[in-house]
Image (cartoon, coloured by chain):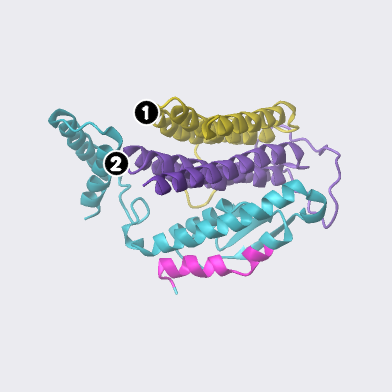
Chain colours: A yellow, B purple, C cyan
């Protein structure tokens, strides 16, 4: 039993725990936090599975997933905060738009 | 060279197992902590040390190739993007009016009852 | 100056990611790097914030120190998850920041968020609101050690 299998199982267990928090979270922000954490763990899982199958090319997918996860979290948060994706970030004083 | 390979394997096992420990602790903390602000702290653990240890352990196995460079890039991306996302989440929560529970003492197991409606300014 | 360093950085990233070194693909790489640099100059984002080359090697030393802080505070938070009755003690407070520029403030606030156990909730003009999980992590921010280090690497004494 290689170390990659152990790591993949541990990450899957953690994803299951985070998913249960996403299902029963009392506020919407709990769910966003859980989805963000699941995304980070998915990056780890893709890397570990790629090494487990002897195909480190999966790391490209992991890089793309890390960036997509970040942008997706910010987009969802902006939508919840302003009700629309179109308006600018007007609350802060320093931003240009 | 045999000794060196064995040492690298042992280091990889140690790094990945400690990383797995922190990943599971993260999931458990997400499930267990009483309110949102403390769950943010628990989620921050998977972004920082756990990903650093697991990806570092993979980098020890892959040797000095382009794969290692990609792993270092993933670590750098996670370390730059995760505090930004966490700050955006914390500030959106704070602006939406969910006040943190500031306590001096014991953890009670009752879930927080305050809900946020909408979240618009 | 910054334009040339941006082209060098993007070209290095291209070479490290592609791994296929035929003349055609390297030509594509050079073309797209120059295109990206021109678009970035037209968008006016190549300034001291978009490409902070003035920080130099100091920030590497700071990252090493920050990594050690992250390890310590991770152990704190893990203890807090396992034994919440003993360690969990949330607090919320504001501290002053001593950096002048926006870049220094952002580096400081992101460093606070990056160490688990403390999260930046709000960043006003010159004070930052921090939510801390345990008493130890709260004292770590209140002592101002990280603040001094960030000010030192920004050379804003």
The residue drawn where x is 71% and y is 31% is A21
Q: State whether residue C129 is above or below residue B49.
A: below
The residue drawn where x is 32% and y is 53% is C47
Label 1 chain ID: A
Q: In which quarter of the image is residue B108?
A: top right
Q: What element carries label 2?
A: helix
Main SS category, magenta section: helix
Range of the magenta residues?
A: C138-156
Residue nearest the viewer, comparing C108 with C45 = C108
The residue drawn where x is 55% and y is 46% is B14
Q: Furthest residue to the bottom? A: C157
Residue C63 falls within the magenta-colored stretch: no
How far apart are the alpha carbons under marks 2 and 1? 16 Å
Q: Is A79 positioned to the left or the right of C151 in the image?
A: right
Q: Is mark 1 on a helix, strand or loop?
A: loop
Name the residue carrying label 2: C13
Whether residue C144 is visible = yes
Q: Is B57 positioned to the left or the right of B38 in the image?
A: left
Residue nearest the viewer, comparing B98 with C153 = C153
Q: State whether residue A48 is above or below residue B68.
A: above
Q: Furthest residue to the front? A: B2
Label 2 chain ID: C
Whether residue C118 is visible = no
For the residues labelled 2 and 1, say whether their Cβ atoms are less than 8 Å apart: no
Quarter of the picture holding the C terminus of chain A: top left
Name the residue carrying label 1: A57
Q: Is A4 positioned to the left or the right of B35 in the image?
A: left
């Amino acid at each position: 039993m290689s170390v990659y299998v152990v790591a993949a199982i541990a990450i899957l267990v953690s994803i299951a725990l985070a998913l249960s928090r996403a299902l029963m979270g009392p506020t919407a922000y709990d769910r966003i936090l859980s989805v963000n954490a699941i995304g980070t763990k998915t990056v780890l899982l893709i890397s570990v599975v790629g090494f487990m199958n002897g195909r480190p090319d999966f790391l490209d997918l992991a890089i793309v997933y890390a960036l997509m996860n970040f942008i997706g979290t910010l987009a969802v948060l902006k939508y919840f905060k302003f009700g629309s994706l179109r308006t600018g970030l007007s609350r802060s004083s320093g931003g240009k738009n | 060279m045999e000794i060196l390979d064995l040492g690298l394997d042992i280091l990889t096992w140690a790094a990945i197992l400690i990383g797995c420990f922190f990943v599971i602790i993260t999931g458990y903390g997400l499930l267990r902590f009483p309110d949102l602000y403390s769950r943010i702290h628990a989620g921050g653990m998977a972004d920082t040390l756990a990903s650093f240890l697991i990806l570092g352990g993979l980098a020890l196995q892959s040797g000095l190739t382009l794969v290692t460079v990609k792993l270092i890039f993933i670590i750098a991306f996670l370390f730059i993007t995760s505090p930004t996302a966490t700050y955006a989440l914390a500030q959106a929560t704070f602006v939406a009016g969910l006040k943190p529970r500031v306590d001096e003492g014991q953890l009670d197991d009752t879930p927080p009852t305050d809900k946020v409606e909408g979240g618009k300014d | 100056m910054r334009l040339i360093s941006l082209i060098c950085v993007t070209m290095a990233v291209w070479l490290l990611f592609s791994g296929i070194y035929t003349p055609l693909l390297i030509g594509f790489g050079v073309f797209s790097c120059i295109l990206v640099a021109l678009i970035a100059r037209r968008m006016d984002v190549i300034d001291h914030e978009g490409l902070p080359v003035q920080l130099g090697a100091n920030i590497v030393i700071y990252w090493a120190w920050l990594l050690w802080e992250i390890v310590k505070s991770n152990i704190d938070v893990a203890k807090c998850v396992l034994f919440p009755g003993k360690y969990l003690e949330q607090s919320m407070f504001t501290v002053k920041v001593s950096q002048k520029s926006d870049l220094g403030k952002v580096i400081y606030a992101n460093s606070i968020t990056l160490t688990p156990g403390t999260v930046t909730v709000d960043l006003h003009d010159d004070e930052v609101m921090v939510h801390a999980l345990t008493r130890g992590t709260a004292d770590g921010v209140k002592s101002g050690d990280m603040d001094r280090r960030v000010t030192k690497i920004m050379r804003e004494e």
